[in-house]
Image (cartoon, grey):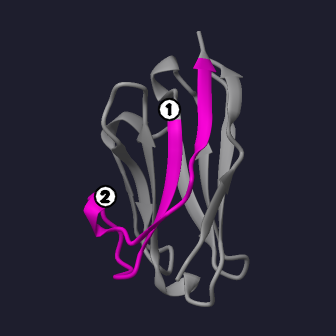
């Protein structure tokens, strides 16, 4: 069992930056791929970024490429999402998720554990 707790959300002006963190419990964090998803009001949850278990492979949805960076610290059992150049359309609840297969994917159904989410609001 893995428990995930996100933090770092908040209100920021367009063009600003935030760094989200997701702290995981359990001893198997280093074997899990990790992903970030987001859900805006009235919209379906969408994939944002993912990272393989060792951090060698990363994946991004097109709309955040060049602006967001996913990283992980297995010693700290934490995954991060650095968000630069934020836009109002990035406003959403951001969720981290853990995938036992370890490779990383944009498919939400592949993830086994989810955090409770953290709100990111970007003002124009």
Q: Alpha carbon of mark 2 to alpha carbon of mark 1: how far?
A: 16 Å
* Residue lying at 51% horizontally and 57% vertically, measured from the top left: 96
* Residue lying at 31% horizontally and 58% vertically, measured from the top left: 108
Disc 2 target residue:
108
Asked if residue 115 lies in the magenta stretch, the reply is yes
Q: Evaluate if marks 2 and 1 touch, with contact meaning CB atoms under 8 Å apart.
A: no
Residue 14 point in image, percent of width and height: 61, 17
Residue 19 point in image, percent of width and height: 68, 45
Q: Earlier in the sequence, mark 2 or mark 1?
A: 1
**Mark 1 Cα within 10 Å, few/some/many (few <14, many 20+)?**
many
* Residue lying at 50% horizontally and 73% vertically, measured from the top left: 55
* Circle number at residue 82: none
Q: Is residue 83 left or right of residue 39?
A: right
Residue 106 point in image, percent of width and height: 30, 57
Q: Quadrant of residue 74?
A: bottom right
* Residue lying at 45% horizontally and 22% vertically, measured from the top left: 89
Q: Is residue 51 left or right of residue 104?
A: right
Boundaries of the magenta span:
93-122
Q: Quadrant of residue 124?
A: top right
* Circle number at residue 92: 1
């Amino acid at each position: 069992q893995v428990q995930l707790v996100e933090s770092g959300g908040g209100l920021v002006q367009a063009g600003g930056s935030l760094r989200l963190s997701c702290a995981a419990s359990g001893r198997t964090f280093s074997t899990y791929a990790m992903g970030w998803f987001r859900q805006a009001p009235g919209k379906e949850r969408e994939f944002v970024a993912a990272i393989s278990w060792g951090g060698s492979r990363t994946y991004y949805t097109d709309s955040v490429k060049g602006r967001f960076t996913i990283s992980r610290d297995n010693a700290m059992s934490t995954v991060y999402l650095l968000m630069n150049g934020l836009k109002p359309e990035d406003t959403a609840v951001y969720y981290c998720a853990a995938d036992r297969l370890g490779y990383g994917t944009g498919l939400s159904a592949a993830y086994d554990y989810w955090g409770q989410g953290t709100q990111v609001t970007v003002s124009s």
